[in-house]
Image (spheres, rainbow, N blue to C red):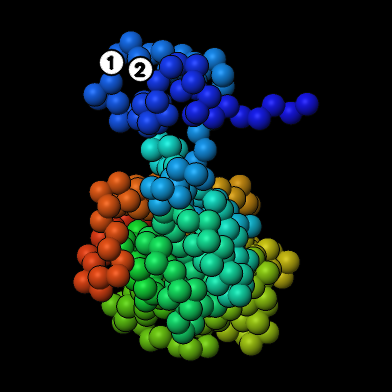
Amino acid sequence: MVKMPVTIKEIAREAEVSTATVSMILNNKDKSISEATRQKVLAIAKKRNYIPNTMARSLVTRHTRTIGLIMPDIVNPFFPEIARGAEDRASLSRYSIIYCNTDDNLMREEAYVDILTEKMVDGIIFTHSADREGEADGFKRSRVPIILIDRDYDIPNVIGKVLVDNTKASYVGVNYLLDRGYRKIAYIAGSMHTQTARDRLEGYRKALHHNQLVFKDEFVKIGEYKSQWGSEAVNAFLKEKIPFDAIFCGNDLIAIGAIKALKDSGYKVPDDIGVMGFDDIYMASMVEPSLTTVKQPNYEMGYRAAELLINAIEKKELSVDNQSTKVDTIILDTELTIRQSTK
């Protein structure tokens, strides 16, 4: 027979105190209660294996100590590191995280916003789909505070952002290729629906311009952040006979696919063609040749996003109805990781 969990009333009866007294002790609001009574109640609660009814408590406090984390592609190794950073920081403050993977599906993205709102999460950390365009209706219906991470976007209820300067990061990466003697640099990008992708393309343009090189549309392929797209784009460049000597890629998965396609076509990397990625996922050091890339601090991004959200929740600075609510923006640094895929 399954035992029913012990209740506050039962603890109060055994301790011969009121339920209000037990509640105050178990919720650390017992400053006016004697130490003897406090220890007695805690000992009974421990003996009876008392487990707090967080759902009942949340109905009163409207505070569930849970955070929603909406990610666009959990298969991409970049995003699990963000999730790990967010979870590590959340656990320090005894918050739990509900993970939602959208697979870059806009309908799933909207549905998860509604689900998390129904579950009364205290806030949401959100990276939108690469195909997101227009307004996000789910966030209009929700009054849950939002922290944007990795991809900037104009949606309601945003109280904070954790981003990198993608224009600068891309500029530094392409400029490194130029410094190494490459002059015909192709660019394989992800979807241009994100500000992140548009900023990286702008950094590529600026690096060419500052080195007196002309930007050419035929040297740019726009698609998605997947390795298959990297292979397809390289094959398209080769078929079109684009005379490139290096490829800058929108992320590491694209770069890994590009290296495979180049090898399959008989090219040596980096002897014939240099390849650079973006993110520095764990696979970047394992491919052959190991990948030169722009390292993003993805673990720190997740950690800082959770910290920003939890601090706001604890300080109760969540007046999302107020359009003038201050948005805290954290811009983290990127750095070059030099390996064997470039000269």
Disc 1 designates what residue? 34
Query: Which residue corresponds to the image point at 39% horizontal and 67% vertical from the top-left?
Result: 143
Mark 2 residue type: Arg
Residue 243 % position (x, y): 55, 81
Disc 2 designates what residue? 38
Q: Circle 1 sits in a helix, a strand or a loop, which is it?
A: loop
Residue 250 % position (x, y): 50, 69
Q: Is there CB contact under 8 Å for labels 1 and 2?
A: yes
**Location of residue 158 with respect to 204 vertically, above or below:** above
- Asked whether, in this view, residue 324 is left or right of residue 171, the answer is left
Query: Which residue corresponds to the image point at 62% horizontal and 51% vertical from the top-left?
Result: 287
Q: Circle 2 sits in a helix, a strand or a loop, which is it?
A: helix
- CA separation in Å, label 1 and label 2: 6 Å
Query: Which residue corresponds to the image point at 43% horizontal and 37% vertical from the top-left?
Result: 94
Query: Which residue corresponds to the image point at 40% horizontal and 63% vertical from the top-left?
Result: 144
Q: Quadrant of residue 260?
A: bottom right
**Location of residue 126 with respect to 245 vertically, above or below:** above
Label 2 Cα neighbours within 10 Å, binned few <14 / some 14-19 / many ≥20: some
Single out the residue that lies furthest toward the right: 1
Using the image as rendered, state which of residue 92 and residue 5 is in the foreground.
Answer: 5
Using the image as rendered, state which of residue 48 and residue 68 is in the foreground.
Answer: 48
Residue 131 visible, this orientation: yes
**Location of residue 245 with respect to 173 vertically, above or below:** below
Residue 200 visible, this orientation: no
Residue 20 % position (x, y): 38, 31
Label 1 Cα neighbours within 10 Å, binned few <14 / some 14-19 / many ≥20: few
Mark 1 residue type: Ser
Residue 19 % position (x, y): 42, 29
- Which image quarter is the N terminus in? top right
Mark number, residue 125: none
